[in-house]
Amino acid sequence: MIPEFEKFKGFKAKSIPKDEPLAPGHRACQGCGEVLALRMVMKALGRDVIVCSATGCMEIITTPYPHTAWRVPWIHIAFENAAAVASGVESARKVLKRKGRIPKKHIDIMAVGGDGATGDIGLQWISGAFERGHDFLYVCLDNEAYMNTGVQRSGCTPYGAMTTTSPPGSESFGQVTWKKNVPAIAVAHNIPYVATASPAYYLDLMNKVKKAALVKGPAYVHIYSPCPTGWGSAGERSIEFSKLAVETKVFPLYEVIEGRYVMSRKITKPKPVSEYLKGQKRFRHLDEAHIDYIQKRVDADYEKLIKLSEMT
Amino acid sequence: MNSAPKHPEQPDIRLMQGNRACAEAALAAGMRFFAGYPITPSSEIADFLASALPRHGGSFIQMEDEIASMGAVLGASLTGVKAMTATSGPGFSLKQELIGYAALCEIPCVIVNVQRGGPSTGLPTSPAQSDVMQSKWGSHGDYPMVVLAPSSVKETYELTIQAFNFAEMLRTPVILLSDEITGHLYEKITIPPPEAVPVITRRSPRVAPNASYKPYLPNEPDLVPDIPDIGTGFHFHTTGLIHTPDGFPTREPEEVRALITRLHDKINSRKHEICLYEERNTGDAELILCSFGASSRSCFQVVEDARKEGRKIGGIGLKTLWPFPDFIFHKLSSSVKAILVCEMNCGHIIGEVERVCEGRCRVEGLGKCTGTMITPSEIENAIKRIK
């Protein structure tokens, strides 16, 4: 068991911090699930944090010149290198503490990026930071495509989804590859804490982020983030889709604590994936055969996860 | 995709975006492989090709990053397919190592850079022309570069085809240096019929595969070797190390010199063919407005206005930036009083103009690095300052 977790009792709905380290009034789209998740992340972390933010929607909507929604120190870097800059920040603070130039007080360091910045262009930089064992947390806000440049596919775009660079038509049915399992890649680095979270289960999300911050060494939290603009879904249904993703086993919630898989929510009566797929324009072209394939693969992936949780 | 006109005898006139024209022209030039990564303001090129290329029997891959996109383009081109990538400032920076590789290994390819304001993330949705020097000197080492800069949708179409033809003819990477204005501009364009588009394709070896074939042995007089496509029976070596005509690494000073100078000579010796430009009213002009890309539109407007008023102002719109068309300025500098170089940067092309003019005429600059275009009235004000 991780000693840092012993004193942490978890957030309660009644006692959620009222403070908003990420201020309201930013420019996110209506119904943005990503900024909602980020708000919860920041509530869990509080103000004693340095944030290194990759290029992406959250960077743009929180900082339209001359405004900022960030009430904490915030560095916007390039697209690929949030984890590398966080490594530098963490190492430099160690040096300054050693020399007595700054107080010994612990400050969390968070690198944050979207699915493109995390699973595609930034992957090697995250891998390096995990390998070196910096004491920081990496949060991936996964809205399953490059939304800020006009909805292009990413490695985390789900199978069959329509994006501008995975268009369905006579030659294709949309995204032809299965969603890249970035949490599994994080786990493969033998870091102490990996978790998946969803804004629909906000207490679970906040607890996981807090644990990721508490643990010594690198931690990774992968957060499902509905994007009404990119998915062609109704803004008011973002939380509903977040719930459906979990209930249909499309986006399972779990933790991997020192290599041990723990299911956060076991789905015993799963809903069919078709319930999740309908209502999102990105999936509306899919025929029965594709939906059947998705159902089978989702079931198989979930089964693997259950086995992992039973094994470890 | 728009369909062909119903009456084939009628010209194919369309209202088209600059980025779309680039993608359409690439298809017309025979490009059948595109690898890219989303980046504003070039994403429309990838978006269109994602659906158009499969229908043309081609292949579109969205890669995991900018470097990988460039790598895939090199792999596809080495295999024998005309290949392209499109990006903007930050992505262009990331691609530089492999652009140098393409120049050294003589891999034909086209890299589109729809310029935005920089440095770093800069101004993703605003125009700039500040990658002029990077497009020439971006990768390390001595290598030549062919860079074309379109100023309109029509020119984007023409120069994209030209870029592929130069790349194939010279076996070299060619950069199409567009800008946010030209890339996002919608204009009328007449798409030429396929038979009117000259398409050049690289030469293949003229002999059957044999053990003594030297893939990098230059031909006379164009100094371009007949490098076989990978996988066509020839067994040869491709490397980013300095190599001899057989493709194997060398450190022999004479062999190193031979390769590096040949790479430059194959391009510089055909400067008059490669350097494209538009001249307007330069014959009797006392003042020349020199520009390229979107900025040359404002310059030509001023030239037109000035001529109506009887002022002796002419314009030069450079379509080829590299190799630098010095011969134009050798000639002009002794007949005009001044040249005003207008560019959306802190002064790139002006340095070249000054170097070539050697003080024979006054060279002044209107550099603007505000993320906004140069207007005709700003040029008029700059002209007043000269006089």
Image (cartoon, rainbow, N blue to C red):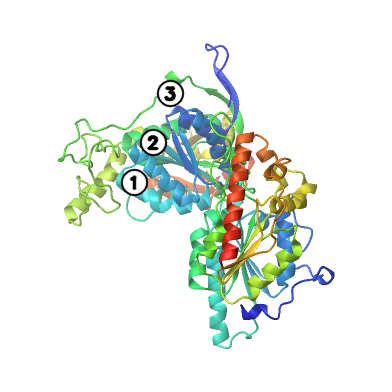
* In the rendered image, the vertical position of residue B222 relative to residue A253, given as above or below: above
- Residue under numbered circle 3: B197
* Residue B81 seen in the current view: yes
Three-letter amino acid code of the residue under disc 1: Ala
In the image, taking residue A228 as reference, residue A195 lies left or right, namely left
Q: Nearer the viewer, residue A48 or B18?
A: A48
Quadrant of the snapshot with the N terminus of chain A:
bottom right
Q: Quadrant of residue A36?
A: bottom right
Q: Nearer the viewer, residue A310 or A243?
A: A310
Quadrant of the snapshot with the C terminus of chain A:
bottom right
In the image, taking residue A56 as reference, residue B170 lies left or right, namely left
Q: Nearer the viewer, residue B255 or A170?
A: A170
- Residue under numbered circle 1: B103
- Residue under numbered circle 2: B275
Whether tag 2 and tag 3 are in contact, CB under 8 A, the answer is no
* In the rendered image, the vertical position of residue A33 relative to residue A3, given as above or below: above
Q: Secondary structure at mark 1?
A: helix
Q: Earlier in the sequence, mark 2 or mark 3?
A: 3
Tell me residue A141's x, y (percent): 65, 57
